[in-house]
Structure formats: structure tokens, C-alpha cells
Image (cartoon, rainbow, N blue to C red):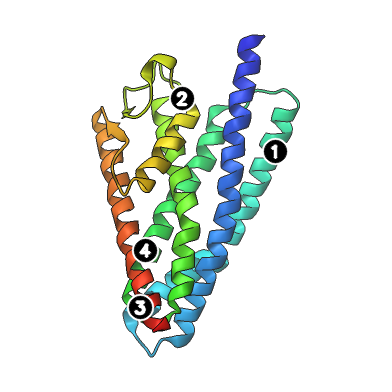
């Protein structure tokens, strides 16, 4: 009974994380629509910029609304089942997590693409988009590390190692989200170390994306400062 209760509690926490990602994704899509709409309206026939704008608008106006309806129904069904005391299958979490991870990558590429046409869009809009993207970024990566290293594993630490966590007290799901956030706040100083080949590749990708976000944020702040002056 204790194990069943603990399992439902851990599933409820993970469902809450996915619901938060759902809300953050909705906000990010609106910012993406504003940035891409401004870019599309101000372009003077730039081929590269129009590709970026069209790609962003397809995501914001077509892919995202349909996906959010599906994900919303999916989350609602999971919440009802969990509220009735049922144990949810692992794939129901993984399906949502995979979608949010793919959106993470798609938005990252879009934000990077917009830097080449940033002068056509108000810097404050793009800076706001990056700032709102950061919580989604760190929470999604926290879920990825938690899913691979903790869920269905005999013991944690075989995929990635959390360098600032006391290993003697045990590892919880919260530690992975904390490590993901700490790495971003520590100016890219890694608090997550890859152990296996998969773990090292994931950490390398994560740190590379963190450095890219730092560069993008700095560029937007500089652009915004120049616009104000």
C-alpha cells in the first residue's frame, strides 16, 4: 500500500511538471507568433528572413493549436485517471515529454534563426521571447535527465551524475530540475556530468544550448540598448 501510494504521489508530481510545461509552451507560442508576425510584416523581400518567419508562423498558427488541444485532453485524461486512484502507464508521460522536448529543440532553432533578421523585429519582443523560453528550457531538460537517469533505473547516477547533490541522502526527481536550473544560473558551469555515452552526449548538447542562449540574450540586450540610445 505504501509503495502504491508513493508511486501515485510521484506520478502526480511528474504530471504537475508536464502541466507546467504545457502552460509555458502556450505562452512561448504567443511570443513566437508576435515575433514572427512582426518579422513577416517588416521584411523587404529577404529570402532567409521569410523562411524563418514562415517556419515560425507554421509552428505558432498551425502546429501549436492542434498540439495543445491534443496535449490538453491528454493531460486532462491523465489527471482524471490519477484522481480515481489508477496507476498511469509510463508511455503516457513519455509521449508528452517527448513532444515538449521536440518543441524545445524547434523553438531553440527558431530563436537562433531570428537573430539573422533581428533588426526587422523590436529587440524587446525577441528578448522577451528568450526570457520566457528559459523556464521552459530548464524544466524540460530537468525532465529529460530525470526520465533517463531515475525512472525505471535500479539506481541513479548511471546516466548522469549530479555533482552538487549529496549522494548519501539519495536522489529525488527535484534534484534533476535543480541541477538544470543551477547550471543556467551559474553561467554554464556544469552541475550535471555525463557518466555513460548517452549521458555525456546529452550533457554536451545541454551545455551547448545553454551557451547559445547566453550569446542570444547578450545580443538582444545589446540590440535593445542601442535602440534606446
86 relative position to 217: left or right:
right
Q: Residue furthest right?
A: 84
Tell which circle, 3 or 1, labels the residue nearer the N-terminal end.
1
Q: Residue furthest top?
A: 1
- Rendering quarter of residue 149: top left
Query: Cα distance, mark 3 to mark 1?
Result: 41 Å
Q: Which residue is mark 2?
A: 151
Q: Which residue is mark 3?
A: 117
Query: Which class describes the residues within 10 Å of circle 2: few (<14), some (14-19), or many (20+)?
Result: few
Query: Which class describes the residues within 10 Å of circle 1: few (<14), some (14-19), or many (20+)?
Result: few
Q: Which residue is mark 4?
A: 217
Tell which circle, 3 or 2, labels the residue nearer the N-terminal end.
3
Tell which circle, 2 or 4, labels the residue nearer the N-terminal end.
2
- Rendering quarter of residue 170: top left
Residue occupying image coordinates x 43% and y 52%: 104
Give the foreground label among 3 and 1: 3
- Which element carries disc 1, helix, strand or loop? helix
Query: Which class describes the residues within 10 Å of circle 4: few (<14), some (14-19), or many (20+)?
Result: some
Q: Quadrant of the C terminus?
A: bottom left
Query: Cα distance, mark 2 to mark 4?
Result: 33 Å
Q: Are marks 2 and 4 in contact (CB under 8 Å)?
A: no
Q: Quadrant of the N terminus?
A: top right
Residue occupying image coordinates x 39% and y 65%: 111
Query: Which class describes the residues within 10 Å of circle 3: few (<14), some (14-19), or many (20+)?
Result: some
Above or below: residue 97 compared with residue 220: above
Tell which circle, 1 or 4, labels the residue nearer the N-terminal end.
1
Query: Cα distance, mark 3 to mark 2?
Result: 42 Å
Residue occupying image coordinates x 25% and y 35%: 200
Give the foreground label among 2 and 4: 4
Amino acid at each position: 500500500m505504501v509503495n502504491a501510494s508513493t508511486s501515485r504521489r510521484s506520478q502526480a508530481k511528474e504530471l504537475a511538471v508536464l502541466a507546467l510545461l504545457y502552460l509555458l509552451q502556450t505562452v512561448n507560442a504567443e511570443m513566437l507568433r508576435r515575433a514572427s508576425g512582426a518579422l513577416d510584416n517588416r521584411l523587404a523581400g529577404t529570402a532567409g528572413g521569410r523562411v524563418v518567419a514562415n517556419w515560425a508562423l507554421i509552428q505558432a498558427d498551425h502546429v501549436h493549436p492542434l498540439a495543445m488541444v491534443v496535449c490538453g485532453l491528454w493531460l486532462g485524461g491523465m489527471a482524471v485517471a490519477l484522481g480515481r486512484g489508477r496507476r498511469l502507464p509510463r508511455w503516457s508521460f513519455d509521449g508528452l515529454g517527448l513532444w515538449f522536448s521536440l518543441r524545445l529543440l524547434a523553438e531553440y532553432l527558431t530563436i537562433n534563426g531570428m537573430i539573422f533578421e533581428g533588426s526587422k523585429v523590436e529587440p524587446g519582443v525577441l528578448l522577451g521571447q528568450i526570457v520566457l523560453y528559459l523556464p521552459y528550457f530548464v524544466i524540460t531538460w530537468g525532465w529529460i535527465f530525470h526520465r533517463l537517469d531515475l525512472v525505471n533505473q535500479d539506481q541513479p547516477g548511471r546516466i548522469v551524475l549530479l555533482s552538487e547533490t549529496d549522494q548519501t541522502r539519495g536522489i529525488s526527481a527535484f534534484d534533476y530540475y535543480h541541477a538544470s536550473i543551477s547550471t543556467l544560473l551559474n553561467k554554464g558551469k556544469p552541475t550535471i556530468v555525463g557518466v555513460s555515452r548517452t549521458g555525456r552526449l546529452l550533457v554536451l548538447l545541454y551545455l551547448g544550448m545553454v551557451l547559445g542562449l547566453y550569446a542570444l540574450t547578450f545580443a538582444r540586450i545589446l540590440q535593445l540598448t542601442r535602440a534606446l540610445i
